[in-house]
Image: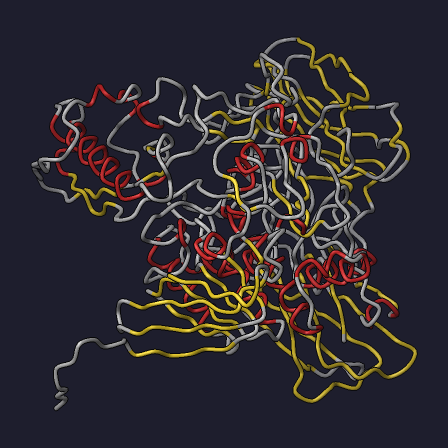
Amino acid sequence: MIREQATDKRTPKTVRHEADLIVVGGGLSGTCCAVTAARAGTRVVLVQDRPVLGGNSSSEVRLWVLGATSHMGNNNRWAREGGFIDEVLLENLYRNPEGNPLIFDTILLEKVISEPNITLLLNTAVYEVEKSGPETISGVKAFCTQNSTAYELTAPLFCDASGDGIMAFQAGAAFRMGAESTEEFGEKFAPTAEYGELLGHSLYFYTKDTGKPVRFVPPAYALQDITKIPRYRRFNAKEFGCQLWWIEYGGRLDTVHDTETIKWELWKVVYGVWNHIKNSGQFPEAGTMTLEWVGQIPGKRESRRFEGDYILKQQDVVEQRTHPDAVAFGGWSLDLHPADGIFSEKPGCNQWHSKGMYQIPYRCFYSRNVKNLFIAGRIISASHVAFASSRVMGTSAHGGQAVGMAAALCTRDGLLPRDLTEPIRMHELQQELLKTGQHIPGLHLYDGSDLAQSATLTASSELILTEFPADGPLTPLTSAVGQMLPLATGPVPQLTVWASADQDTTLTVELRRSSKPENHTPDVTLQTLTVPVQRGQQELTLNFDAMIEEPAYVFVLFMKNEHVRLQYSELRVTGVLSVFNKVNAAVSNFGKQEPIEDIGVEAFEFWTPERRPKGQNLAMKINPGIALFGVENLRNGVQRPTNQPNGYVANPTDPNPTVTLSWPDVQRISRVELFFDGDFDHPLETVIMTHPETEVPFCVRDYLLCNDRKERIFQKTDNHQTRNTVYFEQPIESSSLTIHLKTVNGAAPAALMEVRVY
């Protein structure tokens, strides 16, 4: 029994934690920051004011995770974010292809609690910041409502990934809120006051068909007049969750301090919408449906943005400007929403894409005036217009990883965030990020301590792509179709395709490339052929005179002709894709982007893949064959296709694909890093949109490592991850290392993107 005498006042139980890094905010950016730092040896306290991790991606909000891939609706090929966020998304695909947000919660929690260097504090809100000087945070105070415990958290370094920037705000960090004028940064897409300066919050609902009649009596506060929502006719009984992202409100209010007011308005809307669906009589299919879940907290889009030494701008996004301190990338559209949200007469979003991915500089990830404060997530240093792209969770997570690695280097060397901008230190940060799989456009990894760099590389076979066999469907050209092919410098090979026509006609075929080698927007036409097609089945031989001046992907584009059917192939190969000039309703892709006024964005066509099981390659003979899938790609420092495949691919007929690294002398091997093809082109949305597989078909499932005596030293089965790290408790002594690529998760030939040996 506990009995205490009456007293005037008591203080809560108080626990003190000291760490190298305090991360405030357990959304995707904070989680990725914490795990990346912890794996690099940094002691981290991760403070999250909710019962689960993930922020807007968690089961409390249920927004799908997206970034530069943009639902495969833009021209950013192989653009899914790498590193730890890739690990999470692939794990979610493996366990949760149905997109259950509760399962996604468990994956994030499992990853965090598995890290011994992380102390996780859930249901714990930071409420006070302590400073040792005008520019230095010394600690924060937080309180957990579930265990009635106060926490005093101290560290040399802090990261605010809280979404609203609660710690950065209290620490006095310079910030902005709302839109800049066109004149401040020369951003032509800057919104008018009439359009509004802030994006609002959203709140979602899930439905379930019970199989029997269910009635719904709306709460008294439900919106009564559905016609107050100008787009109310878009509601239907099939869409739910973040498919209804445009249930948005609050852009005219203070999106920090008015959040509870905004939430109540969104609750009114949600229950009013469901009342309309259930009781208007317009949706008889909803008779057996019930509400399964309604969000309790709204998903926030925008509030404060904190100033770093650089402010990301519209021009950085559209022009794809390069930065010497690039540490992450983005690729979502410039995506502004009307401030009146669901009550606006305007479209729910105003999206404009760039022609490719853009770099995000490190100077956007720390405060310009609080010298030991990192910032991550949607609050990074960006203008309102650039924020419209950088705010999405995949991009935020990728930036969080950059902060985590930066914090680890600062901890190791006793530095402050700004110190890493010195060129030598920045180079080290970039290289350490690349080692984890963090793709940074335009940068290559070179690690002098990697034994693979001095090895002789051989393989049992190497793919020379001479043919996509004609074993797939015969499909009419109801929309234009393109085959992306990686080519080296020199002449374009002769191509032969199979076609069938219901009458004599002509087929227009264009050969294009991108104006930037690492983009995948076919905006430069090299040659156009007009090919006669006779009624019936036939081979069509395409002879192009164009020369390729630098290694790049070319697009062989077959223009729409409903009288022609083209033969497809079932063969899928790492680094090769077919694309289609179609509308993608999931984003603002109408086949072509055509601004009708000068808003600082470009006009171009969209050529995008289709999701598996669709999207087969075109059946095609290639003479001479494409020999760009060799074993030397394994050490070129790029782990995904860019302007080239950048991977080793075995011949599809090879019964036992192997890669061997040999040295003239015996080496002591303690660790091997392997990167497989996790198909960075597939977005891996975490909820709502289901996926056709639980493992990426290009990814090697089973593999063996053998020494120079052909002894098995490691075996892996059921792999579904891009990155595999193999540790040996006792170093292996061998003059060679052979990797047996035993089984692939799909029908694609075995592929490997990188190998490093230490």
727 above or below 1?
Answer: above
Looking at the rendering, which quadrant does residue 247 occupy? top left
Q: Quadrant of the N terminus?
A: bottom left
Q: Residue furthest top?
A: 504
Q: Position of residue 457 (x, y in %)?
A: 84, 65
Identify the residue at image location x=63%, y=71%.
40
288 above or below 533?
Answer: below
Q: As rendered, which of 575 and 171 lies closer to the eye? A: 171
296 above or below 497?
Answer: below
Q: Quadrant of the C terminus?
A: bottom right
Q: How many marks?
A: 0
Q: Position of residue 681 (x, y in %)?
A: 59, 44
Identify the residue at image location x=66%, y=59%.
437
Q: Position of residue 721 (x, y in %)?
A: 57, 62
657 above or below 58?
Answer: below
Q: Is residue 114 left or right of residue 506?
A: left
Q: As rendered, which of 420 and 174 lies closer to the eye? A: 174
Residue 395 seen anywhere in this rendered image of the structure: no
Q: Is residue 301 left or right of residue 662?
A: left
Identify the residue at image location x=65%, y=87%.
729
Q: As rendered, which of 111 and 551 lies closer to the eye? A: 111
Residue 478 seen anywhere in this rendered image of the structure: yes
Identify the residue at image location x=40%, y=68%.
141
Q: Position of residue 309 (x, y in %)?
A: 67, 47
